[in-house]
Amino acid sequence: MKNLICMGICLLALLLALVCTAAYAQEYYTLPEIREQAAQGWHETYTDKYGRTRQVDIDIEVFGEEKVPVIKACWDDPYALLFQGEKDPYGEITEEVDKGRGEYVFLYSSVRGMTVDLDQKYGEAYGNDLTPREVYAFIEQCLQERGIDQDYIWERPYTFSLVYGQHKKSGEVLVPPVYYIWLWPQEQGLPIMEHVGSAFQRDIDVPYTAPYLQIWMRDRENYSCAVIDFDVQEVLAEDIPLCAVDKVIEGARKMIEDGHICQVLSLRFGYVVYTDPDYQWKRGETAYDMPAGYLVPSWILECYILNNPKVDKLSEYAGVATLVINAQTGEMLDWFDTSYHGRGDGRYKGFIPWDKVK
């Protein structure tokens, strides 16, 4: 009898060991290998369970260099900074619109993922001969004068807009073109793209934000700028293993086939900010009161999403959703998650180190 019990215990221990091993049994890759896999893009046709055809035809964007660190960061002091020149240039256009004689004309309207030609005079035909390079150089100098020395993904802004004000009737240019550019900050070559709170329909149970730089600029006298900066507190891992790109795509496939994702816009690799798991939010505190955030290498999937997949109408779209896929497991965070205080669970949960998979 004792022998049977011992055999049973040994078998149970063996099964547990096999389960633990299976968790790390998948293949893992370095960032350069992931970049090579992503070069083929994502080109696939799916049929959801309602019989609708969904076409995915996009390039896959992989930022970064050789390694993908996990970083604990803290918000800088001051946490948010807003400054402007003589006038707010966008406000000038709004004034003309409010008077009833002007209207907005967008040459570019919140274009996502656009590769900007730094030396092109995008607004020259309408009275603004500044290039993005000149805009960036001026704003960078303003930031450095205020103690902020941060690098950004200059050539690939999150959104790029160019708008001018014209007379409703005559078409005369009332206010020359204004650049409105939203930029991602970068750390070790990886852009900090989003906060995990955006990955849930009901967001998370604490206020949240992510670092960014927003620029409104017409010329060197008329500009405004908003920035949220951060400092690296600790590098928790110099590099982590990543799952295959195919596994990442597989993580998104179920949402497509279930009818929730109706159009995929982009798939990008970079940082997502997770919340401090030990932080206890107190009423009245803002996102800037949180002592730390965790920069976790992740995949960001931008898409149009249907909360009610049975009704395929524009009025039912939840707009552009930002879904997050774990870069080590390929698992997508549940858009409908309400497991943490009735909201999504955006707490940092650690990472798989290389020594666990080699």
Image (tube, grey):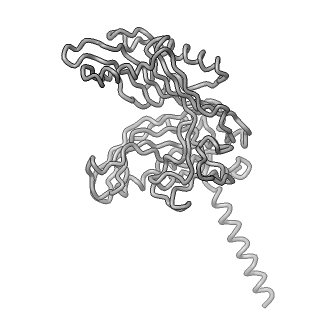
Residue 128 visible, this angle = yes
Q: Is residue 228 above or below residue 133?
A: below
Locate residue 244, reporting x and y percent. Answer: 55, 46
- Nearer the observer, 76 or 153: 76
Task: List the single residue furthest toward the right.
Answer: 2
Percent position of residue 326, x then y: 56, 49
| Residue positioned 69% across, 54% down in the render | 278
Q: Residue at x 76, y 85 (%)?
A: 5
Identify the residue at image location x=40%, y=22%: 90
The residue nearer to you, when weighing 213 against 13, is: 213
Q: Quadrant of the N terminus?
A: bottom right
Q: Give the image location of residue 245, x and y in percent.
A: 52, 44
The picture places residue 346, in percent across and down from the top left corner, at 57, 52
Where residue 184 sits, quadrant-wise, is top right
The image quadrant that residue 167 belongs to is: top left
> Horizontally, is 293 left or right of 332 in the view?
right
In the displayed structure, 135 sits above or below 65; it is above
- Residue 64 visible in this rendered orientation of the protein: no
